[in-house]
């Protein structure tokens, strides 16, 4: 809970509208600084300023309509640029592993999504019945992928999909939890020899989290069959497997005692069974633990658990070949909320959020998760034909929160445009000449801008370059026009050279190519 | 209306379910070929096959749930790859003109969208009231941009935004009209000297349509002030300006006689006024026509029309400097449907859809449109402060339809993955060695795949490369392991060389770098 200052608290008692003094937070939220001084077009600004302006959903505050929906946000240029960089890093990894891109609609038939997400089904956004089909916004990219495979009778595919999903969750925007957010998914569909695709998914998580240099991380791994076997030997009735699994899933947020009382009090599990589960879910380790549980007198008698443990052992062997077991933990408390998992499940958490530069490090929780879902495609196939699948989803929004904080703290300036040259003039009445020149540059593929003024001052044109990070200025003047040259100025050094007009494109390219 | 064959018609009378014979169209649609032979992971296939499989919304046909919502579609890999290429071309142009990227939510408050789209407001998708705010899906990117500017008090900005928008329109999917589709928008906000940003928007349309080589095109230009002035001098009452404007907007789809009878019959305009409008809306031309109308005894007396014509003249002067008037037509019948335009409006149409290779060329209609909307931001500002804006939207889906047909007709194979090398083995029991090697390659940034089989046949591994376009195979074998080498095979030429393991990464890079 945020504590509200007196102004914010009082603000809720006043009628909405612009008449009542200074802007104040709407909806009981403490608003961040929102005002933004008018700058020139493309003002580079600080990420800090832009992101602050867009943070949370509260907007102008003065007018009730001036906001984005609860739990959503705009991405201003500096933020969008950072996000594009991050998404590019993730997609690079997915392509490195041979995945093809697909895209599916944001809208799905309501019935496509129902019965796939367990208790989370209530978080699905539904569209109004406006006549015609009953629609909903996708909750993840996995169910649409399974629907796509079944609909097109595809039995083999390695694909990635980067797109927004929607959850009517309680947003915790400071921790990077939004109602609209990007998911970056990589999935392997097909009948293959066991645990090879599963191991590749874990390798991908390891690569991405290492590449992004987010600090130390841990990938927890478990298997739904081990969980189910464990529930069975602990005396949980079959009918309660899924709901008890949901309770176990909360162990990363609430302590065992609370989970236990939910199991016994709300879900009617016997105290003995709960305690028995409690013994197991505190276990975590590596190959040793797997070997130990394979010898466990009760678990080893359970067919499902034995299968799961056997595969877990194989998985660890492959992960050893990949050299990544150092960051992998077999953890019996990992359950994952979604209904559709059938085998291996995993979740990556950051151990020490990068906090060298920030005072209050954000707690971001899980930054990647996934698992095997061998039954989901069959739910869509009229004959129930199964296509085994395993996949991973990168929690890109939470990683954003960390990178945002880091960039903000470092006061790094992010250029939001790629303009190479500003076409300027030193005298009046040269708009036509500026337009003629910039047209030549655009046609040659040069990224160029011009101020939208008939007679801008040279100083203002140079200042615009300083503000937006444009490295070069091409200056036209009466004399230069007569001489058939353009004066090219390097903004950083103030160096000026006359370049023959026919060589200008080449000169700009040369001076702005990356070293 | 589609005519249904006997099977399809009969099919509607039978209960749904897989038991009743062959697949049949659902919902009275004639379904396209949907079956797709199972292929290896990443099957390159033909775009034709993939696109056909995803065309329209009808899916399996056997099960009513197996489809995407009406008017939406999946994008299979070959399609997604083509789309990414197209979007990249558009974004390159936007960046060439110095725009920064922003992103806004797909969801907006319902009230943000209301009263902005005239008669099209009924096409907005609304979300169910699930408690909390009343939400809708964005109808375009322009209104969210205006909301963003007002909310953040930004008075100067040049931005682009490429994202999906939603319209509950009657889909005509063969012509590239969908209910979910990409818009690619470029907008310039700010108070500047007249017509310079407007001219840049037209230059951008010209550049993009030229770059994409879609065949001949024409950009029609008009001005809302000229239209309003024309309505005034024709005797249209002020209160009917917008609705008569909507009628004029239909002139590209239905003949004048029908538009006239709508004006007179449905909208209560006098026949004389309608005929008067009829005289004007058949006019189109260039600077000559502008000069002629500036001399028109009635129009020249109307303040709005005079302003509009004066600016149109200035616009044509700038377009002349840009060298693009050859494809621009000042056209008095152009009206544009949306309420928010206040000045210049424009729309680009393809004159001869590329039809060298296709039997029935798609008629795609408008492929770009835009205009000036000086009042929209003020509608969101509590004090009504205006931020003048002008922008352009590229109709990317319609352009897709053309490119799709072209690729399909040419049987061009589009690679959907970028994998550089397949790690293979010639003997059994080498899975561990394959995994060790591929892990090294991934860590070095090489795009590599491995078949998920313990003991795949070499022939199958080579076939996989043929199918998916992977250019190289790195083969591990007992002897190679002993010798510290890997056999590198070039798929196209079948050439094989032994490469020392420590040089393998460099060798793959060298052989797969673009010439």
Image (tube, coloured by chain):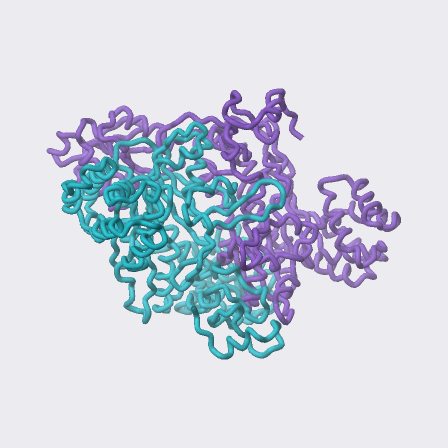
Chain colours: A purple, B cyan
Front residue of this view, candidates A105 and A11: A11
Q: x, y (%) of residue A177?
A: 60, 40
Residue drawn at x 61%, y 26% as measured from the top left: A12
Left or right placement of residue B413 versus residue A19 in this view: left
Front residue of this view, candidates A261 and B271: B271
Left or right placement of residue A341 versus residue B250 in this view: right
Left or right placement of residue B458 versus residue B265 in this view: right
Please tell me how many numbered marks the rendered image carries.
0
Q: Is residue B366 above or below residue A348?
A: below
Residue drawn at x 53%, y 74% as measured from the top left: B24
Q: Residue furthest left?
A: A482
Q: x, y (%) of residue B38?
A: 53, 71
Q: x, y (%) of residue A201?
A: 60, 54
**Which picture quadrant has residue A231?**
bottom right
Q: Is residue A188 above or below residue B239?
A: below
Q: Quadrant of the C terminus of chain A?
A: top left
Q: Quadrant of the N terminus of chain A?
A: top right
Q: Is residue B301 above or below residue A95?
A: above
Front residue of this view, candidates B478 and B208: B208
Q: Is residue A503 something that shows in the picture?
A: no
Q: x, y (%) of residue A443?
A: 24, 46
Q: Is residue A243 something that shows in the picture?
A: yes
């Amino acid at each position: 809970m945020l504590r509200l200052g007196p102004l914010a608290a009082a603000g809720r008692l006043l009628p909405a509208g612009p008449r009542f003094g200074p802007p104040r937070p709407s909806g009981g939220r403490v608003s961040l600084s929102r005002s933004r001084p008018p700058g020139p077009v493309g003002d580079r600004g600080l990420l800090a300023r832009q992101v602050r302006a867009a943070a949370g959903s509260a907007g102008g505050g003065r007018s009730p309509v001036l906001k984005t929906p609860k739990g959503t946000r705009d991405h201003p240029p500096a933020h969008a640029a950072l996000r594009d960089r991050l998404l590019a890093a993730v997609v690079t990894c997915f392509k490195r592993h041979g995945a093809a891109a697909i895209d599916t609609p944001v809208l799905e038939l309501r019935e496509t999504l129902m019965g796939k997400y367990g208790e989370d089904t209530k978080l699905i956004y539904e569209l109004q019945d406006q006549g015609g089909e009953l629609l909903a916004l996708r909750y993840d990219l996995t169910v649409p992928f399974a629907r796509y495979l079944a609909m097109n009778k595809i039995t083999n595919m390695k694909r990635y999909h980067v797109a927004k999903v929607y959850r009517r969750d309680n947003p915790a925007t400071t921790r990077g939890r939004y109602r609209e957010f990007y998911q970056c998914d990589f999935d392997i569909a097909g009948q293959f020899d066991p645990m090879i695709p599963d191991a590749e998914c874990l390798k991908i998580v390891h690569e991405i989290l290492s590449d992004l240099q987010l600090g130390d991380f841990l990938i927890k791994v478990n298997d739904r069959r081990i969980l189910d076997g464990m529930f069975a030997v602990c005396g949980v009735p079959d009918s309660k497997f899924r709901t008890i699994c949901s309770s176990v899933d909360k162990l990363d947020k609430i302590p065992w005692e609370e989970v236990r009382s939910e199991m016994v009090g709300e879900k009617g599990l016997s105290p003995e069974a709960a305690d028995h589960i409690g013994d197991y879910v505190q276990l975590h380790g590596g190959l040793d633990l797997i070997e130990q549980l394979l010898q466990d007198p009760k678990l080893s008698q359970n067919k499902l658990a034995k299968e799961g443990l056997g595969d877990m052992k194989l998985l660890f062997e492959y992960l050893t070949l990949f050299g990544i077991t150092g960051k992998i933990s077999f953890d019996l408390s990992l359950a994952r909320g979604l209904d559709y998992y059938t085998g291996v499940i995993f979740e990556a958490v950051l151990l020490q959020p990068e906090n060298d530069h920030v005072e209050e490090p954000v707690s971001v929780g899980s930054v990647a998760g996934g698992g095997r879902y061998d039954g989901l495609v069959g739910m869509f196939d009229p004959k129930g034909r199964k296509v085994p699948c395993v996949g991973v989803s990168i929690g890109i929004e939470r990683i954003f929160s960390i990178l945002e904080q880091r960039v903000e703290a470092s006061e790094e300036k992010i250029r939001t445009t790629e303009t190479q040259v500003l076409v300027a003039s030193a005298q009046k009445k040269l708009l036509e000449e500026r337009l003629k020149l910039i047209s030549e540059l655009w046609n040659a593929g040069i990224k160029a801008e011009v101020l939208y003024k008939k007679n801008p001052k040279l100083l203002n044109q140079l200042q615009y370059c300083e503000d937006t990070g444009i490295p070069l200025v091409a200056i036209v003047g009466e004399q230069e026009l007569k001489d058939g040259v353009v004066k090219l100025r390097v903004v950083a050094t103030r160096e000026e050279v006359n370049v023959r007009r026919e060589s200008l494109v080449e000169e700009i390219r040369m001076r702005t190519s990356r070293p």
